[in-house]
Image (cartoon, rainbow, N blue to C red):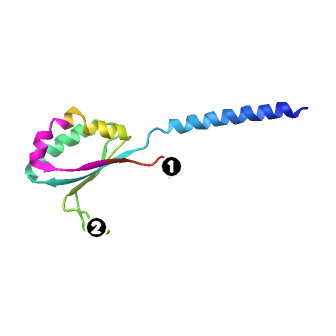
């Protein structure tokens, strides 16, 4: 007859531990997001003086922004290497990355950017597990 309180206590303990684990997983936050771009620069001087510093300033206001790669040498592991400048930026999360590239400060340079360079870019987030 004493097994009923033990079972009830075990169930309550399991529920409490489960709730604590769920709370801990939510506390980890959203995974980081990476923006990868291949920039074709048509006006190197304009890019260096007019676009790049202002773009980095605008993006720098986003949560967790860090520039991981800003041009430099690109080596192909398989297939041809891109003939463009490669940029990789990291943000605290996917929402922060999208918000940074859609910000008024970044978009204000849009018309000027199209005359200086062209770049497709994509954003991806780090998986939560693994």
Residue 27 located left or right of residue 53: right
- The residue lying furthest to the right in this view is 1
Closer to the chain start, of discs 2 and 1, is 2
| Residue 43 rendering spot, x and y as whole percentages | 8, 52
Location of residue 66 by image quarter: top left
Q: Is residue 70 visible?
A: no
Q: Specify the quadrant that holds the N terminus.
A: top right
Q: Is residue 21 visible?
A: yes
| Residue 63 rendering spot, x and y as whole percentages | 34, 37
- For residue 47, the mark is none
| Residue 54 rendering spot, x and y as whole percentages | 17, 40
Residue at the spot 22% in from the left edge and 50% down from the top edge: 120
Above or below, 76 against 92 in this view is: below
Residue at the spot 19% in from the left edge and 58% down from the top edge: 84
- Asked whether residue 110 is drawn in magenta, I would say yes
- For residue 76, the mark is 2
- For residue 129, the mark is 1
What span is in magenta?
Answer: 107-122
Secondary structure beneath dot 1 equals loop
**Mark 1 residue crowding within 10 angstroms, few (<14) / some (14–19) / many (20+):** few
Quote the CA–CA distance across marks 2 and 1: 28 Å
| Residue 89 rendering spot, x and y as whole percentages | 30, 48
Residue 46 located left or right of residue 126: left
Contact (Cβ within 8 Å) of mark 2 with mark 1? no
Secondary structure beneath dot 2 equals loop
- Asked whether residue 65 is drawn in magenta, I would say no
Nearer to me, 117 or 57: 117
């Amino acid at each position: 007859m004493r097994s009923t309180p033990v079972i009830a206590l075990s169930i309550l303990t399991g529920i409490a531990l489960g709730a604590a684990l769920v709370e801990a997983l939510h506390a980890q936050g959203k995974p980081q997001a990476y923006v990868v771009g291949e920039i074709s620069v048509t006006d190197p001087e304009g890019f260096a003086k007019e676009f790049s510093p202002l773009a980095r300033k605008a993006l720098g206001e986003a949560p967790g922004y860090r520039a991981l790669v800003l041009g430099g040498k690109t080596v192909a592991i398989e297939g041809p290497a891109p003939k463009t400048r490669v940029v990789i930026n990291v943000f605290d999360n996917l929402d922060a990355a999208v918000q940074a590239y859609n910000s008024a400060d970044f978009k204000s340079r849009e018309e000027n950017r199209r005359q200086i360079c062209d770049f497709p870019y994509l954003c991806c987030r780090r998986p939560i597990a693994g």
